[in-house]
């Protein structure tokens, strides 16, 4: 007697689950060579450079939150990975200076 088993092979894709970025910066998300479909939940906050490929560049455009999704779609594997990107405005503070005029 033979039994059939369905074996699902995981893609092994690994991207960070969360990122904190500052307005004006970029970050590249890349896979282990697997072509994936990339999506952003909020292109006003964090647009992506590519919707299909082995990598994409996230640009921190405005403060807020966006979820970047990488979907592996093939005949053997269907997996979705997400990375929550929090974009913050960089605030620089300078020490106070007092000027005395005589």
Image (cartoon, helix red, strand yellow):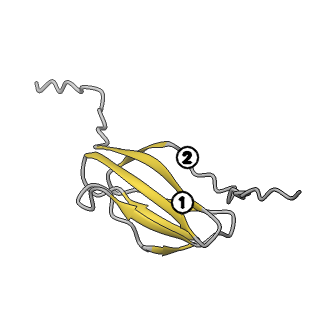
Residue at horizontal 46 percent and vertical 66 percent from the top: 57
Residue placed most toward the observer, 72 or 59: 72
Taking 50 as reference, is 10 left or right? right
Residue placed most toward the observer, 11 or 82: 11
Query: Eyeballing the image, is 14 above or below 37?
Result: above
Structural distance between the alpha carbons of marks 2 and 1: 8 Å
Taking 43 as reference, is 56 left or right? right
Q: Please indicate, yes or no, whether residue 26 appears anywhere in the rendered image.
A: no
Report crowding for label 2: few under 14, some 14 to 19, many 20 or more residues within 10 A (C-alpha): few
User: Toward which corner of the image does residue 99 lie, by quadrant?
Assistant: top left
User: Toward which corner of the image does residue 98 lie, by quadrant?
Assistant: top left
Residue placed most toward the observer, 97 or 89: 89
Residue at horizontal 29 percent and vertical 38 percent from the top: 91
Query: Eyeballing the image, is 15 above or below 38?
Result: above
Q: Secondary structure at mark 1?
A: strand
**Number of the label disc, if any, that sits on residue 20:** none
Q: Residue 2's x, y, as percent?
A: 86, 59
Residue at horizontal 32 percent and vertical 42 percent from the top: 90
**Number of the label disc, if any, that sits on residue 29:** 1
Q: Please indicate, yes or no, whether residue 94 appears anywhere in the rendered image.
A: yes
Q: Give the residue furthest to the front.
A: 1
Q: Residue 76's x, y, as percent?
A: 65, 67
Q: Residue 70's x, y, as percent?
A: 49, 60
Taking 70 as reference, is 44 left or right? left
Query: Eyeballing the image, is 12 above or below 91?
Result: below
Compare marks 2 and 1 and give the one earlier in the sequence: 2
Q: Are marks 2 and 1 in contact (CB under 8 Å)?
A: yes
What residue sits right under mark 2 in the picture?
16
Residue at horizontal 55 percent and vertical 46 percent from the top: 16
Q: Residue 34's x, y, as percent?
A: 64, 69
């Amino acid at each position: 007697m033979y039994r059939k088993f369905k074996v699902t092979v995981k893609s092994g894709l690994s991207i960070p689950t969360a990122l904190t970025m500052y307005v004006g910066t970029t970050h590249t998300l890349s896979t282990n060579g697997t072509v994936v479909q990339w999506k952003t939940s909020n292109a006003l906050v964090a647009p992506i450079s590519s919707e299909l490929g082995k990598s994409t560049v996230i640009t921190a455009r405005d403060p807020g939150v966006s979820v970047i999704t990488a979907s592996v779609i093939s005949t053997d594997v269907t997996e979705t990975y997400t990375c929550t990107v929090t974009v913050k405005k960089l605030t620089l503070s300078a020490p106070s200076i007092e000027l005395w005029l005589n």
